[in-house]
Amino acid sequence: MAILSWSSAAIAGSCLPPVPPWMPTDPDDVRAYADLLRRDAEAYFDDAEQYFRCQDQERREVFEQVRAVSEDYARVLEVLRSGS
């Protein structure tokens, strides 16, 4: 059981969401840091896209795990029903 819990935690923790960039509200700060703000926003959107792809990949992997465990569990239930 501990191994199953650990592997589930490892899967769930491998995609980290991006940290939103700071965006100033003061118009003078916006003008002063325009290039930096653009770069930060573009990097954030790129990171968000990678995060979504990672989530999609993890979903596929977990779906496949669930399918395999379901088949294994069906065999366990069959053994229990047959009494062998």
Image (cartoon, rainbow, N blue to C red):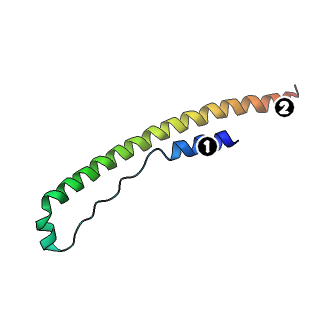
**Going by the image, does 29 lie left or right of 81?**
left
Instruction: Identify the secondary structure beneath mark 2.
Output: helix
Mark 2 = which residue?
A: 81
Q: Please give the name of the residue rendered at 13% of the width and 57% of the height, measured from the top-left corner.
A: 35
**Going by the image, does 76 lie left or right of 44?**
right
From what the image shows, is residue 43 above or below residue 83? below
Q: Please give the name of the residue rendered at 72% of the width and 31% of the height, measured from the top-left corner.
A: 74
Q: In the image, what residue type sits under mark 2?
A: Arg
Residue 83 badge? none
The image quadrant that residue 25 belongs to is bottom left
Quarter of the rendering occupied by the N terminus: top right
Is the residue marked by circle 1 packed among few (<14), some (14-19), or many (20+) residues within 10 Å? few
Q: Residue 7: horizontal and vertical position, in percent?
A: 59, 40
Q: Residue 79: horizontal and vertical position, in percent?
A: 81, 28
**Going by the image, does 72 lie left or right of 48?**
right
Residue 6 badge? 1
Labelled pair 2, 1 in contact (Cβ < 8 Å): no
From what the image shows, is residue 54 above or below residue 74? below
Instruction: State the residue in front, 22 or 62.
Output: 22
Q: In the image, what residue type sits under mark 1?
A: Trp
Is the residue marked by circle 2 packed among few (<14), some (14-19), or many (20+) residues within 10 Å? few
Instruction: Identify the secondary structure beneath mark 1.
Output: helix
Q: Residue 38: horizontal and vertical position, in percent?
A: 17, 56
> Considering only order in the chain, which callout, 1 or 2, is on the residue closer to the N terminus?
1
Instruction: State the residue in front, 31 or 61.
Output: 31
Q: Residue 47: horizontal and vertical position, in percent?
A: 31, 48
Q: Please give the name of the residue rendered at 47% of the width and 44% of the height, measured from the top-left corner.
A: 14
Q: Please give the name of the residue rendered at 12% of the width and 73% of the height, measured from the top-left corner.
A: 28
